[in-house]
């Protein structure tokens, strides 16, 4: 493995780990589920099946939606990050934070944990998408919209977040103030970190190219 690929793997895996640390913090903050989690929970309560089954079902559908938006063949390698994300998410939520509850904590503590969650999610997603490796279908969706309609990351992510949050509300999902805040801010935060980290990522990969040339 070249240093360039090692750097890319580092950014990719670190991004996944930080992202789901953030997702877990948001869930545990007690401020409301994220927009996707609220949507899948609402479907589960209204139509049956587990939240995980709905998550997997939509991930599978989005593989084909993304292929259509990008005018490409479906990217079945997207199942790789799906498996990785599931394992990392379970690690944070079911092992590290299993007995971590904030329902009785002061509001300022809940807000701090929630803000840390948004920070981690946006930083993690930005790191994770930089190397161009296969992405989970849900993560690829806002990038597919961005490329298809020539939108920036902030616009496509915010639009999808607002639409999903609104749909989650309609189907009776646990939409709270935290859901609204995530929907309105996460796109901007991802855009901020993506722009900041792009130069760092290019620096390390360019250094490797200089050393190998």
Image: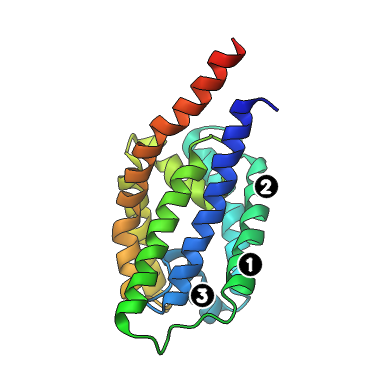
How many angstroms separate mark 2 from mark 1 (CA)? 16 Å
Q: Residue at x 66, y 48 (%)?
A: 79
Q: Residue at x 58, y 33 (%)?
A: 7
Q: Evaluate if marks 3 and 2 touch, with contact meaning CB atoms under 8 Å apart.
A: no
The mark that comes first in sequence, 2 or 1, is 2
Can you tell which quarter of the image residue 47 is in?
Answer: bottom right
Q: Nearer the viewer, residue 180 or 59?
A: 180
Question: Circle 2 — which element?
Answer: helix
Residue 90 is labelled as: 1
Can you tell which quarter of the image residue 177 is in?
Answer: bottom left
The mark that comes first in sequence, 3 or 2, is 3
Residue identified by numbered label 2: 80
Residue lying furthest top in this view? 213
Residue identified by numbered label 3: 41
How many angstroms separate mark 3 from mark 1 (CA)? 17 Å
Quadrant for the C terminus, please: top right
Residue lying furthest bottom in this view? 104
Q: How is the image coloured?
A: rainbow
Residue 164 is labelled as: none
> Does the image show residue 134?
no
Location of residue 149 in the rendering, given as x and y in whole percent from the top left corner: 35, 37
Can you tell which quarter of the image residue 208 is in?
Answer: top right
**In the picture shown, does residue 146 fall above or below 115?**
above
Question: Circle 3 — which element?
Answer: helix
Q: Residue at x 45, y 27 (%)?
A: 202
């Amino acid at each position: 493995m070249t240093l360039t690929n090692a750097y890319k793997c580092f950014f990719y895996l670190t991004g996944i780990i930080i992202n789901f640390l953030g997702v877990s913090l948001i869930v545990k903050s007690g401020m409301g589920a994220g927009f996707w989690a609220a949507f899948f929970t609402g479907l589960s309560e209204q139509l049956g099946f587990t939240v995980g089954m709905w998550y997997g079902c939509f991930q599978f559908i989005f593989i084909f939606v993304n292929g259509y938006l990008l005018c490409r063949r479906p990217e079945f390698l997207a199942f790789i990050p799906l498996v990785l994300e599931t394992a990392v998410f379970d690690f944070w939520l079911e092992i590290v934070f299993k007995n971590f509850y904030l329902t009785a904590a002061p509001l300022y503590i809940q807000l701090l944990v929630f803000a840390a969650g948004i920070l981690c999610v946006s930083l993690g997603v930005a790191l994770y998408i930089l190397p161009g490796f296969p992405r989970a279908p849900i993560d690829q969706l806002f990038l597919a919209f961005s490329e298809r309609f020539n939108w920036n990351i902030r616009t496509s992510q915010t639009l999808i977040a607002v639409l999903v949050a609104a749909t989650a509300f309609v189907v009776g999902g646990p939409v709270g103030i935290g859901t609204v805040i995530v929907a309105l801010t996460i796109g901007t935060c991802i855009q901020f970190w993506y722009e900041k980290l792009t130069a760092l990522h290019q620096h390390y990969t360019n250094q490797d190219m200089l050393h190998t040339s």
